[in-house]
Amino acid sequence: MKLLIKNCRLLNKEGGETFGDILIQDNVIMEISEEISAPKADIIDARRRFVLPGLIDMHCGICEPGYENKEDISSVSKSAVKGGYTSICCLPDTSPVIDNKTVVKYILVRSREVSKINVFPYGSMTKGCAGETIAEIGDMKEAGIVAVSDGDISVQDAKLMRNILLYSRMFDMPVIALSEDTRLSCGGVMNMGRVSAVMGLQGIPREAEEVMAARNILLAKYTGARLHIPLVSAKGTVELIRIAKSMGVRLSCDTAPRYFTLTEDSVSSFNTLAKTRPPLRTQEDADAIVQGLADGTIDVIASGHAPETPESKKVEFDRASYGFSAIETAFAMSYAALVETGAMSFYELIKRMAETPARMLGLEGKGELKPGAGADLIVADFNETHVINSSNFASKAKYSPYDGREVKAKVIMTIVGGNVAYLAE
Amino acid sequence: MFFDRKDFISLREINAEEILYILSTAETMKIVLRQANKKAPHLRGKSVILMFYEKSTRARMSYELAAQYLSANIVDMTLTYDLGEENSLADMGNLIDQMGADFIVIRHPMSGSARLLAEHAHAGVINAGDGLNENPSQSMLDLMTIKTQKGGFEGLKVTIVGDIAHSRLTHSNIWALLKLGTEVTLVGPPTLIPDEWAEFGPRITYNTADAVRGADVIMVAKVRDADVGGQYLPSINEYRNLFKIDERLLKLAKPDAIVMHPGLVGRGAELSSQVIDSHQCLSNDQIANGVAVRMALMYLLSLTGAGSYARREETRL
């Protein structure tokens, strides 16, 4: 089967734009050039809209198996294609935890059955995500994991973390370790600072993230392992990473749009929808994150998709769940906060959301539009203004702190493996 | 050949000539072992004290037999003495000296203990394993097996698989094999192979096939049960998938390669059953050489070391 996409507006590395056609055969991009004619191909007219590589999400909660009331593989995949994502990496803190090859295989088989996108599981670095004993990383690698992660539960035992980093060197995979010192964050429900003081809520200090990031950076430095720090939220962490990279530590990191588009002020009216972990910080932190993205300190923008049930948000702030559905808004919010403001070029943004994640995780043929690559791509429009409305989400978690925001980026069509997986109405 | 040592503590500090001299002496000791009447007068009038602070059957027995075959008197303190924490090794050394013993064979759970005892005793100290540091006498036995099988050491490729960090026998083996001119490759999980070993000469890899390719000798460094399912290793199952030596891997080694393991090996985990039962696997031969090596050690130390050191001290008085 051949598919020809006509009149594509394409980004090139030099920052310029060109127009051309893309020919896809089966699930591979065969040719990209100014004018292609392929008599037997199905034709899609992109109408001079941007055609971009499908986005790759490095931090996505899929909740299946175990928490299908929040989200499942089918709903997250529908949500992902609406947001422009063609591949997602799923966190291991499901139930049962992705800590053995059986669960890895279940995720892979299940996602082929019910989703149209590529699902790349992360394996838990400890058994049961409990942070106590090392998991069968080699077995899981054999079964198909692309990285090890601790989910959203930071490993506190430093010696264990050191051994995990050492052990991971055998497999050339990043160790994705969240930075949270739980002795410091204990009891906290939001950023510790001006707002928490005024509201009478227990705070999570920025040190809780920075201390653990510093520890893990040092462990990575001495073990020579590949460390990836997800969900960077604090200015101090950005600074630590900047220094560590200049020292030659094998280190990468990501952040989520919420850490540069929202601040602790979002929860100032006890708004549980913006209760997240790590918590939303201050404008100073958000500015530092934008700066870190602009200068390349922060490598990747992940969605940080963390769906929870609406019921779990309609409770006292202390009791409310952490997180919100973010995969449908990540691209639009990032575009608004980074490209429209001039902080970052459009090309760089796409790189941080597609090419870089693919390279880090060793996903062959993903993240780039070029002949020979997989036919994962999106058609997006940036000319009209749209209002974010969470009631239209495909995600089960139909609420968002971004409701009512006006954005320009809109995904018109998502093609995964040469098949149209989403078409906007 | 001049072998002037009071003690036998470490193969890190001994040179290649001395190692070869002990090995050739052990060969002659095998003659005694082959006689119908296994008694030789070499250590007549000498006394040997066995101090085993750790459980051991084979090693203790082979020292005891070695001493008896050479006509020494033996006291095994393992059963008769309370080896509590309050009794310092230094005091023990003094005590044994006062009783006039010539040799102390010590196995102790702490690294450096044999050296400490040697510094505080006129008697010759033989290290039968100190903590995670070295087990030089057991290593001599492995070396003897390699020499018998391969005729020498120069240019051999030796691959050691498993837990390098916690294997004192392997540490002694590495030092000796490097001095004897072999190429040493270490393979196992990075949690069990300190990177720093590479600074001393061995090549480190995490790929078992790569490690055994072209090897003359494959040695198994046993993984401790306590390390499985904890911080160092997720499971025996995963260890097996990554590091077990089976027939397929053995085919990558030289056709006449030998596989050595220290006995009680994880059948099906560290070595496949077929490999263990094959003619290339040499665990039992190694044990047979144990007595001869220990006879040689005690005899050589008695010539220039232990006894004479005590005598020199007396003359000075």
Image (cartoon, coloured by chain):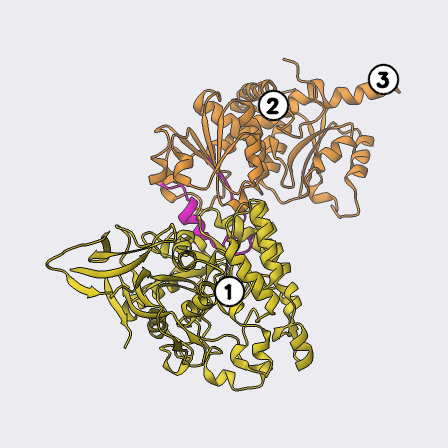
- Name the element at disc 2: helix
- Name the element at disc 1: helix
Q: Which amino acid does label 1 sit on?
A: Cys
In magenta segment, residue B236: yes
For the residue pair A412 and A240, the one nearer the viewer reads as A412
- Residue behind mark 1: A129
- The mark closer to the camera, 2 or 1, is 1
Compared to B97, does A138 lie above or below? below
Looking at the figure, which quarter contains the N terminus of chain B? top right
Provide the letter of the chain coloured orange: B
Read off the chain for label 2.
B
Q: How far apart are marks 2 and 3 (CA)?
A: 27 Å
Read off the chain for label 3.
B
Compared to A78, does A241 lie above or below? above
Q: What residue type is labelled 3?
A: Thr
Q: Distance between the residues labelled 2 and 1?
A: 54 Å
- Measured as percent of width and height from the top left, residue B15 is found at 61, 21
In magenta segment, residue A111: no
| A359 relative to B40 in the view: left or right | left
Image mark for residue B283: none
Read off the chain for label 1.
A
Badge 2 and badge 1 in a common chain: no
For the residue pair A51 and A177, the one nearer the viewer reads as A51
Name the tint of chain A in the rendering: yellow
Q: Please tell me which residue is depicted at 63% across the width and 33% down the height of the picture.
A: B64
Asked if the residue at tag 1 contacts the one at tag 3, i.e. Cβ–Cβ closer than 8 Å, the answer is no
Q: How far apart are marks 3 and 1 (CA)?
A: 69 Å
Label 2 CA crowd tier, 10 Å (few <14, some 14–19, many 20+): many
Image mark for residue B296: 2
| A322 relative to A27 in the view: left or right | right
- Measured as percent of width and height from the top left, residue A130 is found at 54, 65
The residue stretch that appears in magenta: B219-246
